[in-house]
Image (cartoon, rainbow, N blue to C red):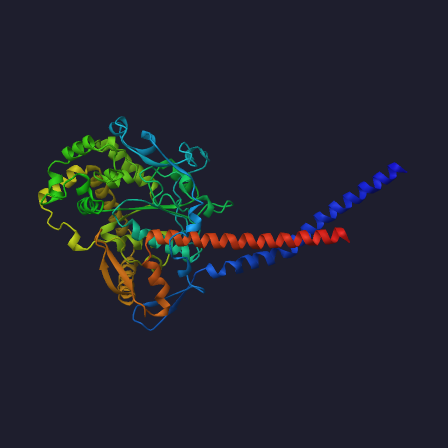
Amino acid sequence: MKTYRNAWNSSIISAIFLGIVIVLVVFNSINSSLYSEQVENTIESWKMSRHLYATKLPSLKRLYYLDKHGYRIALQSEATEHKTLSLPISRLQPTVAETDLNGYDVMHGENEAERDETIDYNFNLHDLNSQEDASPRKRPKCDGKNAIQKVVLLKTHRTGSSTLANILYRYGDLNDLEFALPKESSYEYYWPVPFNPSFTDKRYLNSSRPPHMLVNARLHLNSMAMWKREGAFLIAVVRDPVSHFESSFYRKQLDFLFRLENTSNPFAEFLKSPEQSFKTYLKNERKIDTKLNLAVNGQMFDLGLMRTHFTNENEISRTIEALHEIIDLVLISEYMDESLVLLKRALCWDIDDVLYFTHKQRHKDYKDLEITSEMMRQIHQWNQADSLLYKYFNHTLWKRISEQDNSFYNELKELKMKKMTLEKQCITSTSIEPDTGEIMFKIEEDVPSYNKYLCDKMNTNEKDYIAYLKTKARVKFQKEDLYIKRQFQGLEERIQNSTGS
């Protein structure tokens, strides 16, 4: 009798357990469509919907970027209560491998790079999925449904990368794409350290799938291997070495770094003997300013060439060939419109997606416009690697343009017209930031509503856009988590009620 009772109790327990499993399965089946619908509704207020309405304006379309609740709520710096969430940082001496600084600098022990104890500096993406085919994907013909949405922008300073960043942030924002965003402690992913996946803020990543976009990270070939295997489209932008070096020299205040600010022409004075300026600086300074990396061949440094190879033409050529293989499109700053039409075509985007205002452009009063032919020669000689880089990719750009059909120039004209129209509609005045000489735009308050959000977003600087995207992701995740929590709380109550009765 006792054995029979134990068997009966076991049967009851098994039946209850089986019943719970059945309830879970049935409930999940019944509510799967409801769950998807409600999750979609909870994030609807953060989904930017784009509607294009044709008008009678000659050769133009009006752009309607509508946001139900407006995105301004998040356009502010990171809230102070979130600052406490930042991870502890220590400043340790980097190695040659971590900074790409040459042996002289490390030997003198004067270089520091920001370190994060949560970063695995030995993490090597090249070891992951090493058997997979990493060959470049063939780009499909555009039919309106196959836009490429995985994009990586490699950082090159003072080239127009901030303008490109705004284009990518805006596209990802309006299409609800996910970004690999930098940690709060590092706006530029710990530059000048080459990019490592550990540099991204994991709080804003979806653990079930990789992000769509990575913006303005310093190239590290191994770290980009996974992005390429995921089908990402890699882009970079380079600039004529003469204008680039002049821009870097004054915008990064290299005249003060080399103590030439009191000379009649600091730029010309530096070019007379750049090696001597370097030696004097290294002799007198205990700590090396990271801006020194931009004082010679800054573009090639950003794209991964070590300074020990700056005068090695064979190594420079090998690096350029490697860049040609891994980067899908290198844009040219001086031909930004032509470059963007190529980008638009390669990604199967719309012309409206690549509209832009130029970010971080200096006013002419802050430029050295009296660059002589001798100074140009000195710049090219001092920045040999950058000169070879620019010559190579300027040639490849125009080769690609020559391969386009005649509609390329129609799209180029359309881009220029729309850009000019938006500038007239959006920008009411400009001002000059006194410390940097950069031109700042003031957006017209009475801009037509159909362009209001587009104007504001095009004028948003990179730091503010990163803060906004973090806030947007945080709100999205919080609402999704809250819904899931409530769903399972309701399920638990139903199970308890069913077992209790």
**Taking 226 as reference, is 478 above or below it?**
below
Percent from the top left, x then y, of residue 387? 20, 41
The residue lying at 84 percent from left, 39 percent from top is 7
**Taking 267 as reference, is 448 above or below it?**
below
Percent from the top left, x then y, of residue 136? 38, 42
Percent from the top left, x then y, of residue 23? 70, 51
Percent from the top left, x then y, of residue 121? 40, 33
Along the viewing direction, whichever of 206 and 109 lies nearer the viewer: 109
Please identify the quadrant where the C terminus is shown. bottom right
Along the viewing direction, whichever of 372 and 323 lies nearer the viewer: 372
Q: Is residue 206 left or right of residue 270?
A: right
**Taking 274 as reference, is 40 above or below it?**
below
**Taking 15 as reference, is 58 above or below it?**
below
Examine the rendering and report whether any part of residue 65 can be seen: yes
The number of discs equals: 0
The picture quadrant where one finds residue 291 is top left
Q: Is residue 437 left or right of residue 163?
A: left
What residue occupies the far top of the structure in this picture? 107
Examine the rendering and report whether any part of residue 143 can be seen: no
Q: Is residue 21 left or right of residue 459?
A: right
Q: Is residue 413 left or right of residue 54?
A: left
Please identify the quadrant where the N terminus is shown. top right
What residue occupies the far right of the structure in this picture? 1
